[in-house]
Amino acid sequence: MSTPAESKPAVAPVLKGIVNVRESQLRLVTSVRLRWMAVLGQLAAVALIKLYYGFPFNIGNCLILIAMSAWLNVFLSIRYPARYRLSTSLAFGLLVYDVLQLAGLLYFTGGIQNPFSVLLVAPVTVAAATQPMRYTFILGAIVIAVGGVLISFHDPLPWYEGLRFELPRDYKVGSLTALVASMIFMAFYTWRLNKEARQMSAALAATDLVLASEQRLHALDGLAAAAAHELGTPLSTITLVAKELEHELGPESRFREDLQLLHSQAKRCREILQKLTRKPGEQDPMHASITTVELLEEASAAHRASGKRIIISAHPLPGLEEAAREEPIGYRRPGVIYGLGNLIENAVSFAASEVHLSARWNATQVVVTIIDDGQGFKPEMMDTIGEPYVTSRRYEDKGDKGHSGLGLGLFIAKTLLERSGATVTFSNQPPPRTGAIIQIAWPRSAFELPQGTFDWPGARARKANTV
C-alpha cells in the first residue's frame, strides 16, 4: 500500500495556467443567438415607436443597421459550423461591431438620452464572461468613448410631432456616468463569477486526478498479490531443480557456481514477492478494512521523519453503552487516507514541535481531530479555507519547495473526505494556546463496515482486540 507522500501526482504542471491564461470561450451559436435576440428587440422597438406612437425619426437608417446585423448572422451561420468556438480576435471583433451597431441606432434615436442606451452594457458583460481581461478593458473604453460622442452628436429623440425633447447636458453626463458605473459593476461581477467557476472546475479536475491515481495504486497492490501467488509455484520448481542438479553434478562440477547463483536469485525473487504480499490492497477482508488507529497510523506514516512528534490517541467518548464503545472498523479507502495524509502534512509543516491526532466515537459519530502547535490559520483566511486556490504565505516563509503553490492541497483533501460522507471544519485553538484544529466527522453508519462483515473468525478476533 503506497503512502500519501509517495502517491501524490504532479497536479501543478497539469493545471498551471488554466486559471489565469485563457482564450475566447464564446461559441458561434451563442453569439448568433444573442444577436438574433437583439435584432428582434430592435425591430420591435422601431415598430412600436413608428406604428403605435407615430413618432417621426429616421426609420430607414435604423432598418439598414438592423438588416446588417441580420445578414451578419446569416453569413456566420453559413461560414462556420454551429458548434464552432470563435477565436479571440473574431469574438472581440463581433462584440465591437455590436457596440457600434447599437451606437448607430442610438445616434438616430436621441443619443445617450434614449432609454435603450443602457444596452451598451451588454457586449461588455459578454466580453467579461468569455474574453481575456485586456479585451474587456478595450471594449469598455470603446463604450465610454461612444457614450461621450452620443452626448453631443445625435438626432432628436423620437417624440410627439412639433415638440423637441432635449435633456440638459449635465443630465446626459450623469446618465453616461451611471451607464459606466453599471458597466463596471456588471463586468467585474460576471468576470469574478466566471473565474470562480473555472477555478472550481480546474480544482475538481485535480481532485479527480488525485483520486484516480490513488485508485490505480490501490489496484496495483492487488495485482502484486496476484503476481506473487502465480509466480510462487514456478520459482519453487526452479529452486528444486537447481538443488537436484547441484546434488547430481557434485561439488567438483564446473557448473556448481552457476547453479548456486541460480538458486540464490530464485530465493531472492521469492523474498521480493513475499514483501509484495505483506500489504495487499484487496487481498482479503482483513486488508480491505481499517480501524481508526490504523487509519491515523497509515495516513501519518510518511511524515514520521519530519522531526515533529506525531501523537496518536483513540478511545470512545465517556458514558457510552458497551456496544457503542467498540472501536469502529471502516473500509480502507484510498481517498480518505490521502485526504487525511494531506491534512496531516499541512499540520506537520506548520507545527512548532508536535501534532496530535485523535479519534473519538460514540453511537452515532466518528470524529478525527488534527491539532498542531503552530501559529494557526490566519484570521483573514478563516472564511475561505478549503476553497480552491486559497493558499498561505507560510509555505513561502518556510521555503517549502514541495508544494505547487496553487492552493489546492486543502481543497483536494476536503473534497476527498467529503466524498466519503465526512464533514470537515477548520478552527484555531483558543488563547493562550496557539495552533490549528481540523476536525473530520463521519456519521458512524457512513464510516463503519456493515455488521455482517465480521462474521468470520479473523475479523471477530481483530475487532475484539480493538475494544
Image: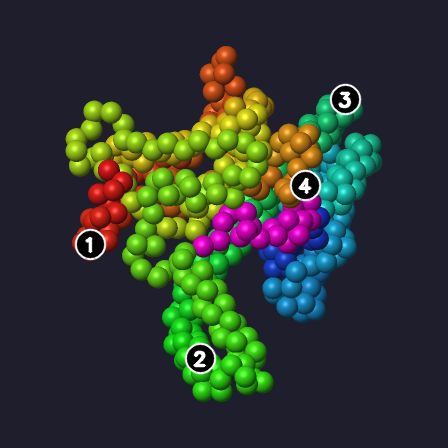
Q: Decide which of tag 4 and tag 3 comes sooner along the chain.
A: 3
Disc 3, SS? helix
- Measured Cα–Cα span from mark 1 to mark 2: 39 Å
18 relative position to 333: left or right: right
- Whether residue 465 appears in this view of the structure is yes
Mark 1 Cα shell of 10 Å, populated few (<14), some (14-19), many (≥20) = few
Q: Which residues are magenta?
A: 1-20
Q: Nearer the viewer, mark 1 or mark 3?
A: 1
Location of residue 262 in the rendering, given as x and y in whole percent from the top left corner:
52, 77
Q: Which amino acid lies under the numbered mark 1 shown in the image of this protein?
A: Pro
Q: Nearer the viewer, residue 463 or 142?
A: 463
**Residue 370 sits above or below residue 331 on the image:** above
Mark 3 Cα shell of 10 Å, populated few (<14), some (14-19), many (≥20) = few
331 relative position to 431: left or right: left
Please give the residue where the numbered disc 1 appears in the rendered image: 457
Please give the residue where the numbered disc 3 appears in the rendered image: 170
Q: Which amino acid lies under the numbered mark 4 shown in the image of this protein?
A: Lys
Residue at the image position 52 percent from the left and 76 percent from the top = 260
Q: Quadrant of residue 88?
A: bottom right
Q: Which amino acid lies under the numbered mark 2 shown in the image of this protein?
A: Lys
Location of residue 343 in the rendering, given as x and y in whole percent from the top left corner:
50, 37
Disc 1, SS? helix
Q: Is residue 13 magenta?
A: yes
- Measured Cα–Cα span from mark 2 to mark 4: 53 Å
- Measured Cα–Cα span from mark 3 to mark 2: 106 Å
Please give the residue where the numbered disc 2 appears in the rendered image: 243
Please give the residue where the numbered disc 4 appears in the rendered image: 401
Residue at the image position 49 percent from the left and 53 percent from the top = 2
